[in-house]
Image (cartoon, helix red, strand yellow):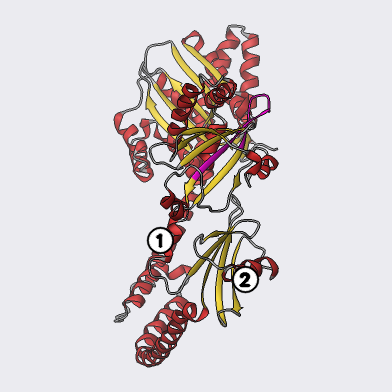
Amino acid sequence: MDTVSLNIAYSNLIKGDFINYLNEDDGSKYEKSKSLMDLLISMMGPLRSVEQINMYGLDGQMVGAGFLNQSVKVVLNDKSWFNSVLGYGGLKYISLPYNNSFFIIDTNLKQKRYFISLYRMCFDKYGQKVAIIETAQDCDVVFGEVSNVLNSGADNMRAFIFNGDGQLMFPYRNIDKEDYAFYFDKINISGQNGLSGSFTVYNPNMKENEVVAYNRSDYTGWSVLVVQRAKQVLAPVKEFTALTVIITIIMLVSSLFLSFFTAGRLTNPIRRIHEAVQKTELSNLAFNNDFELNSSVDELEELNSAFQNMNNKLKQSLDELLMAKQEELQAKMLALQSQMNSHFLYNSLATIGIMAEEHMDESIITMCDDVSFMLRYVSSGQLSMVPIEMEIEYVQRYLECMQLRYGSNLHYFIDVDDEITRAEIPKLLVQPLVENALKHGTNVEPPWNIGVYGGVVDDHWQITVSDNGPGFEDDVIESFECEKKLAWQNNFENNSNSGGVGLLNTFNRLKLTYKENMVFEIRNRPDGGAEVTIGGPLPLKEV
């Protein structure tokens, strides 16, 4: 009813037609009222959410649609709801149930049908009062669900619905005030002020205790009360209590019997598991999980199995930890050996000698400065983690040395976003990839192109090293993508010329540092050559 009323109040079409109807002379009011009735009927919709819609002008002219389609003039001051609706402004006002509605013609129907009306003041776009909208509905529809519950066979259950002023809304037929005023007074006088609740009260009229449950609606301000004799409400509770006591006694007796019966079956297996736990040490993890419990209790067998699995997993975890430490040391040694080996120093010195013979003083200075920086960077063991910008500078120096050696045959570029330069990574992480790219990229005809570029991808720093060489062999890519580290290690140990040592070194150090958050991808480029991408999570920014 409220929704239909609001739809009409906000319909400029209906308000416009109604204003035109009020302003027309008597000769053309009929056509205007007929058009307005059609609009009001369309507002009811196919479900007939309201039975009657009336629009009242402030001068008493009314147009109604529903039970009775008519346009008449009424005296608004005689209506009990008129002053209340004016005082409510545009808010809804809900009437009490009534059975003398003037829009029902049949006298017999008037005596049987009760209605509730919702009234609302309607305004134009300038805020001026235009009309009063009334939407009416049969009380049997409004309170149908309540009636269905009461008629479904509930034992002596009664229901009352009050408006905010304590006036009875339901039931609306043949009711004595003393039958319901008592309950509403109890809610408002006895401190039952919440939106919902329940309490037990002695009813002097019934001369017995009753249980009252109530709920208040924020929307309408109505209070719904359900009343039932306390004996009937508590009867199932008493039956349930008696049944619970009997079942509890039976269960206690059964539990005592079963405890004596199962004590012997449980004590010995638990004692054996306890002894095994006490004997468990790091030195005998592999030999402390081979005994059988031989218990007929499945739970103890599962416990023993879980204990043995725990031993196996603990042994495996310790082995992996030791292997990880060993891999970390090996990775560091491989990094040092692969970055500054004797071949690099020999080639660098030979290059310096050739440049000296050619009187390339500036190049000699650059070469010496770069080699000195690289030796200092590698030999400084204080830092295990360095900013990316330091690692990139080391790569820059290395590539300058290589360009002085190879001349115009070597081209390289470095493009790393400033956003990741302060992120710390394991020392000597990028240069092995560059050296590996240079080693295999020069197996083709020059020019040789080496690229180093990095940035932020999905909250991770990522650095990619690429070359234009022959690319990776298929078995190397397949091994890495299957994530079989031990298989890689065996493969690289058996084939030291595959270039896998530098890749394994980098992979292990990434794995040790970033665990599952590491990024490590190798692939062949579509236009020839190979590229390796590494990465890890960026540190959280300070707020």
Please state which of residues 219 and 507 is positioned toward the viewer in this rendering.
219
Name the residue tied to disc 2: 182
Q: Which residues are magenta?
A: 121-136
Kindly state the secondary structure of the residue where label 1 is placed. helix
Please state which of residues 336 and 86 is positioned toward the viewer in this rendering.
86
Name the residue tied to disc 1: 148
- Residue 386's image quarter? top right
Left or right placement of residue 239 versus residue 226 in this view: left
Q: In this figure, what is the number of numbered marks? A: 2
- At horizontal 37% and vertical 45% (from top left) the residue drawn is 486
- Residue 382's image quarter? top right
Residue 408's spot in the image, x, y percent?
A: 50, 8
Residue 86's spot in the image, x, y percent?
A: 68, 40
Kindly state the secondary structure of the residue where label 2 is placed. helix
Does residue 287 show up?
A: yes
Q: Which amino acid does the dot numbered 1 rest on? A: Asn
- At horizontal 46% and vertical 10% (from top left) the residue drawn is 409
**Counting residues from the N terminus, which is met first, the one under dot 2 or under dot 1?**
1
- Residue 111's image quarter? bottom left
